[in-house]
Structure formats: structure tokens, C-alpha cells
Image: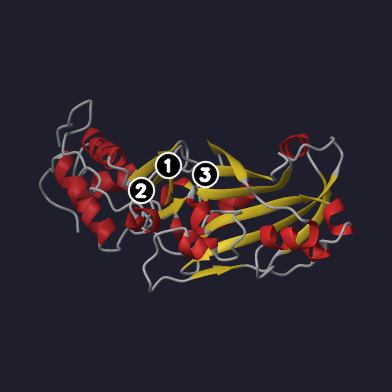
Amino acid sequence: MARTTPLRWRDIANDLLRRIETGDLAPGDGAAARRRLPPEKDLEAHYNASRNTVRDALSWLAQQGFVVSEQGKGTFVVHRPNIVHVTLSAVELGLAPGSGSGEWYNRDAFIPAQREVTVSPVKVEVQEGTKVIARYLQSNPGSEFISRHQELFLDDRPWALQTSFYPLEFATSGASRLLYPRDIPEGAVAYLGEALGYSEVGFHDEIKARLPDENEKRFFRLGDSAADVVFETVRTAYSPEGTAFRLTVTVWPADRTRLHYNDGQVPDDVLRAPGLGPPEDAPRESPPADGAGSG
């Protein structure tokens, strides 16, 4: 209900935040995951406030990460999912992506017991590798590779996309199960050890943040703002001879993922449950940089 007296920017911001937190302006599932706030003119009328006051309120909410404004589209409520902590260096525990465990994603992250991880069926393709894939796997450009792709979900919500690449000659030399569109229960690395004699003695990770492609936007329900980015981890596994024999590319949405590494002697509870440090700083209480407008 509209007020009859002007409100300061902070009063409007607090009321909008209350409406977001109580569900009135909260994002939902599917297309509703990007719930748009009413236009500025509607907010001006609702709160009986000037344009500058409304803009100051929206600016403060944006500074705190509750909303994001997109040119020509409007102001959207930011979905604030629970953070998942992933330890990329947990290979000694058999927990790291590409370490050979078929269930690394269940144990590699700190996930309360009541949460459930599921994966899509394996999608297998034989493709001509890009120059980048060939470089990582020490092959000639134009070489053919097997790709094994899966979508990962946490509590039925999109969590990660993962694709592993292997030289096609592995399948023709005795590791034919790489071509089957189903899981390898003992893990691909263990299977390659049994079938071809490969063993993993080390890995190299490359991590970058980038804008998502259209498929990643759809899967993770991301928008077009500067906050909607993904992490891409590229892990290359090496044999004792220094041969690169497995390439694993995992894509994580940055808004719900924290990536961890450990080195040296780290307590077991930190290894198995990272991310339990001091809480993040409380939201800032200062007004927008340009000051509050008058109602």
C-alpha cells in the first residue's frame, strides 16, 4: 500500500529488502528465477518518493548484492544460493575431480547429510579435438578424442558441468568401456590402469573465470550481468612417464561455488569440511556514494 508521506532512500531500501526476504519479490524456479522489480515510476508512486530517492534505494540494494540492474531490461532480484565448497587438491583422499573416484562430488564438498547429489546419464561423443584439447593431451591437431559429459545436481538444482577427454586410441587399444554411455564404477583412472597400465602420479590445474555460454546460462539459470560468471577448471592427469592421458573440464557457477586448495599438513576436519571459517562481513550500512536524495 502506498504511503502518504515521503520516505527516505533507506526506508524504501529496507522495505524492498523485507519484501524480497519474505518472498514477495524473491526469485522462484525456472523463468521466475529472475524476478524483476517494479519499474522506477511504479516505485515512485508506491512510496510517494522522488526519482532520486528511489534510485538511491536501488543503488544501495545493488551495492549489497541484493539486486542487479541491467541496461534496458530493469532491476532484478539476485538469487543468493547456498555456497558449496569444493576442495580441488583432495586427490590423496580420492576426492578430487578426475582423481578416479566415481563419487568425488559427494565427498569433495562440504554437504550436509540431508542434501543429495545426482548426476545425469553419461553422454559420450567421438570428436576431432580442438587445438586447445590437443595441446593439453600432447597430441597433434586434428586428433580424435572421446568425450564423456555429465550434468551434476545438488538437491535437484544445477551444480556443475563436467567433461573428460581421452585419446580415441585408448578405446581401440583395450579400454573400450570409455565408449559406453554409462558410468565406470571403479572410476576412469582406475579402469585405465587395469586396461592400459596407466597410473596417475600428478595433475596440473588451470582455473579461470569467464562469461557463460548460452547452454551454461540455461543450465545454471544465469543472466547477463557482471555477477553472472562461471569458474572453469581444467585438470590434466599425468602418468609416471610424464604423459598427459586425461583432461577434465569442469564448469561451476561462481555465485554458489568456492574452490579450495590445501598444501602441507592441514587438519582432517578442514580437508573434509572446508569453508567453515569466520562468517563473511556483514552488509555495509553506508548510503550510496552519491548521497541520499530527498523525498
In terms of image quadrants, where is residue 264?
top left
Dividing the image into 4 quarters, which one contains the C terminus?
Answer: top left
The image shows residue 41 at horizontal and vertical percentages of 31, 43
The image shows residue 215 at horizontal and vertical percentages of 63, 51
Q: Tell me if residue 221 can be seen.
A: no
Tell me the amino acid under the disc marked 1.
Answer: Asp
SS assignment at label 2: loop
Residue 122 vertical position relative to residue 275 in the rendered view, above or below: below
- Choose the circle earlier in sequence order: 2 or 3: 3
Mark linked to residue 266: 2
On the rendered structure, is 77 left or right of 105? Answer: left
Tell me the amino acid under the disc marked 2.
Answer: Val
Q: Which residue is mark 3?
A: 230
| Disc 3 to disc 1, C-alpha distance | 25 Å
Q: Residues within 10 Å of mark 2 (few under 14, many from 20)?
A: few
Q: Find out whether the residues at labels 2 and 1 contact each other: C-beta distance under 8 Å.
A: yes
| Disc 2 to disc 3, C-alpha distance | 28 Å
Mark linked to residue 263: 1
- Choose the circle earlier in sequence order: 3 or 1: 3
User: Residue at horizontal 60%, vertical 65%?
Assistant: 102
Residue 92 vertical position relative to residue 119 in the rendered view, above or below: above
On the rendered structure, is 67 left or right of 189? Answer: left
Tell us which disc is closer to us: 3 or 1.
1
SS assignment at label 1: loop
SS assignment at label 3: strand
Tell me the amino acid under the disc marked 3.
Answer: Val
Residue 223 vertical position relative to residue 186 in the rendered view, above or below: above
On the rendered structure, is 268 left or right of 5? Answer: right
